[in-house]
């Protein structure tokens, strides 16, 4: 089954922001999310996978300071 890779940036306040998302194609004809999904008449609801695998998260950047939302609070603004 297909799944998403979600890349994050993490801040010193422990908040994370999504920086990029992409779908990894399983290339299976019986996965409704794949571009390889069969196009001919078939009973998709009963023969094809209707869900993706769980998202895979990766922290790709780490910042030594707080996120923009917490930055104002930590600086007294």
Image (tube, rainbow, N blue to C red):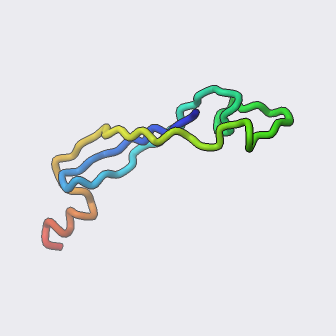
Q: How many marks?
A: 0
Q: Nearer the viewer, residue 43 or 57?
A: 43
In the rendered image, the residue lying farthest to the front is 46
Asked whether, in this view, residue 47 is left or right of residue 16, the answer is right
In x, y percent, where is residue 59?
A: 31, 40
In x, y percent, where is residue 29?
A: 70, 28
The quadrant in which the C terminus is found is bottom left
Vertical placement of 13 versus 34: above or below?
below
Residue pictured at 68% horizontal, 38% vertical: 32
Residue pictured at 58% horizontal, 33% vertical: 1
Q: Nearer the viewer, residue 24 or 73?
A: 24
Residue pictured at 39% horizontal, 45% vertical: 19
Asked whether, in this view, residue 58 is left or right of residue 29, the answer is left
In the rendered image, the residue lying farthest to the bottom is 77
Asked whether, in this view, residue 50 is left or right of residue 58, the answer is right
Task: Find residue 68 and report its image quarter.
Answer: bottom left
Residue pictured at 27% horizontal, 64% vertical: 69
In x, y percent, where is residue 46?
A: 74, 41
Asked whether, in this view, residue 39 is left or right of residue 24, the answer is right
């Amino acid at each position: 089954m297909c799944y998403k890779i979600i890349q994050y940036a993490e801040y010193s306040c422990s908040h994370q922001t999504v920086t990029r998302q992409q779908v990894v194609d399983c290339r299976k004809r019986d996965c409704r999310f794949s571009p390889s999904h069969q196009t001919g008449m078939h009973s998709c609801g009963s023969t094809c996978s209707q869900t993706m695998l769980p998202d895979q998260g990766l922290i790709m950047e780490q910042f030594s300071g707080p996120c923009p939302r917490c930055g104002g609070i930590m600086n007294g603004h």
